Amino acid sequence: MTTTALAPDVAAQEIETKQDRLSTLMDERGWSAVLFSRHENIAWITAGRVEARVALGTETAVCSLLLTRRGQRFYIAPENEGPRLAAEEFAGLGFEPLLYPWTDNTTDELAHKAGGPEIGADTAMPGFYPHNFTALRAPLLPAEVDRLRQVAASVAASTTRVLKTFTPGITEDEMAARISADLLARHITPSVLLMGTGERIFRYKHAVPRAGVLKHYGMLNLCARQHGMVISITRFIHFGQLPATLAANFEKAARINAELLHATRAGATSAALYAVAAKGYAAAGVPDEITKHHQGGACGYLERDWVATPSGTQTVEAVQAFAWNPSLQGAKAEDTVLLNNGAIEILTATPDLPVIETTISGKIYRSAGVFLP
């Protein structure tokens, strides 16, 4: 499954709604305009239509977007990027170009000339007011929910398809190459690739591909992006009988995951959700395991918008995406889910792979088990 970008008229409606959120913020702050340079905010305000990323590892784009309190919209970019941006990114979106020679970046001057003196920005720049716009991206709009579902289904399908091709002897680099190729062929860009094998899975929470070779136990852990939406998923494969201790750890991880999903409700705070995870690890007999890795949190236009922490003040919205990732001693549970007005939907479900069901207060929550070919 490959998602398609919104038609310009549909995107325009979404952008108008988000412009209203921005206008309210600008009124509160006394700003005349807002300048976006970070990828997640550019994708958000353009309804996932604009991909202004050239160097894959950068946090900021090859252009910046200026949105004024009067409703004007501009993209500021070097002249050499102008033709492609006009034809392939901003067509039909109502943004006007403000271009400068690539030898002389005058983004700040052009922004103040078009937007006025008091401008909020998502990056620290002299003469601008830095601001974290994460909270503005929630709750998700219906069109965003549709895109999130489609991208998640595509990523889950790729994960299932590729995991089933793994055989003993494959290297971690080849594991990463196979999932990357499958995603890229569907215009989905991997942003995190953690391919672990054997003892590396037990030893390292972030097992980036190294010299490991799959013998019995392998992990496919990735994040991937399309139309601005970022999806997270982890799946495991084991050849031969699964050790009883490892199987028990997956049951424990699934239990903590289910408890986090059950507690993910509108109004819950980051700190309260962390406490849920901490209680789950304690009940599993491994209270210190929570100190070895973050437990996940809200997502959408980033791998994580925020992660649950002991003192976190962020609050769950009624319609919001989450990716929890409880893990302990070689086992992990990670899916992208949607909280939609009180109901949890597993967006990266992989029905062709094993599932662990956990019941809490009469509700069944499903976490991924280990694939045993």
Image: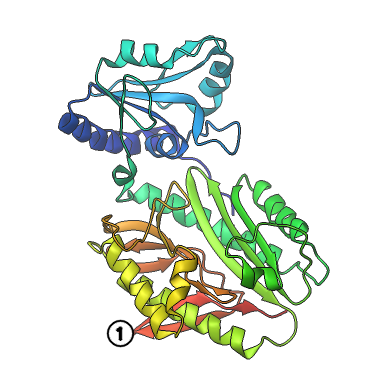
Residue 14 is situated, as x and y percent measured from the top left of the image, at 34, 39
Q: Quadrant of residue 249?
A: bottom right
Residue at image location 62% in from the left, 44% down from the top = 187
Q: Left of 300 or right of it: where is 238?
A: right
Residue at the farthest right position: 169
Q: Which residue is mark 1?
A: 361
Quadrant location, the C terminus: bottom right
* Helix, strand or loop under label 1: loop
Q: Left of 219 or right of it: where is 360?
A: left
Q: Left of 368 or right of it: where is 287?
A: left
Residue 101 is situated, as x and y percent measured from the top left of the image, at 54, 9
In the rendered image of this protein, does residue 207 appear above or below residue 52?
below
Residue 340, visible in the rendered structure: yes
Residue at image location 42% in from the left, 34% down from the top = 42
Residue at image location 68% in from the left, 74% down from the top = 237
Residue at image location 31% in from the left, 35% down from the top = 131
In the rendered image of this protein, does residue 131 appear above or below residue 167?
above
Q: Quadrant of residue 365?
A: bottom left
- As shown in the figure, which amino acid type bears the numbered disc 1? Ser
Residue at the farthest bottom position: 244
Local packing at callout 1 (Cα closer than 10 Å; few below 14, some 14-19, many 20+) is few
Q: Quadrant of residue 297?
A: bottom left
Quadrant location, the N terminus: bottom right
